[in-house]
Image (cartoon, rainbow, N blue to C red):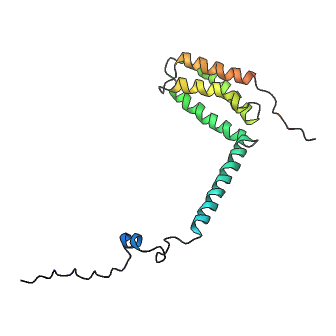
């Protein structure tokens, strides 16, 4: 019997660097995973995306955005018509459509500001929460849209001095 302990076998050479070898190596021997320009390139790309979102938001709120919101309200109108229950009469549906069409026209022409639409949007949310719009809810929605249409004003224009 021998008193010597056998030595560990030599590790096999791998074609890649293991993560443990990477983290155990001194910092002077570690090659960066990504090139040094990557953080600057990603940062620049994120700034471009933020600028695009900012410009898109300002266009949506500006003159061109009125038609965008009018289209959105047209889609909401179609969805709400599909939620009307059987008790909603044809007259109520026609009144609702008339007010919604007038509202869409006022939004597209800039006569209605987005902050004036908030009560109406809350009414839509409350009425359509159960995916059904009853006759009473249809009447409330029509009245809410009518109130906004009555308060529609001529679009404001900035005066240059």
* Residue at horizontal 49 percent and vertical 24 percent from the top: 132
Rendered position, 28 above or below 135: below
The quarter of the displayed image where residue 159 is located: top right
**The N terminus - image quarter:** bottom left
Image position, residue 41 (x, y; %): 61, 65
Left-right relation of 14 to 47: left
Rendered position, 92 above or below 110: above
* Residue at horizontal 58 percent and vertical 26 percent from the top: 124
The quarter of the displayed image where residue 100 is located: top right
Left-right relation of 29 to 68: left
Give the number of callouts.
Answer: 0
Q: Which residue is farthest left?
A: 1
Q: Which residue is farthest front?
A: 3
The quarter of the displayed image where residue 144 is located: top right
Rendered position, 160 above or below 93: below
- Residue in the foreground of this view, choosing between 104 and 152: 152
Image position, residue 82 (x, y; %): 52, 29
- Residue in the foreground of this view, choosing between 69 and 27: 27
Image position, residue 28 (x, y; %): 49, 76
Left-right relation of 90 to 12: right
| Residue 90 appears in the picture as rendered | no
**The C terminus - image quarter:** top right
| Residue 107 appears in the picture as rendered | yes
């Amino acid at each position: 019997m021998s008193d010597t302990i056998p030595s560990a076998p030599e590790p096999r050479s791998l074609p890649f660097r293991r993560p443990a070898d990477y983290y155990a190596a001194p910092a002077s021997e570690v090659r960066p995973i990504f090139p040094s320009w990557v953080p600057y390139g990603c940062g620049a790309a994120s700034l471009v995306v933020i600028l695009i979102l900012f410009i898109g938001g300002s266009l949506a709120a500006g003159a061109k955005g009125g038609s965008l919101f009018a289209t959105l309200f047209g889609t909401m109108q179609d969805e709400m018509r599909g939620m009307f229950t059987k008790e909603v009469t044809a007259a109520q549906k026609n009144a609702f459509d008339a007010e919604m069409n007038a509202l869409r026209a006022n939004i597209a022409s800039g006569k209605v500001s987005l902050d004036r639409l908030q009560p109406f949007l809350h009414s839509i949310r409350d009425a359509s929460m159960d995916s059904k719009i009853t006759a009473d809810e249809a009447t409330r929605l029509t009245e809410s849209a009518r109130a906004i249409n009555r308060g529609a004003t001529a679009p404001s224009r900035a005066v240059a001095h």
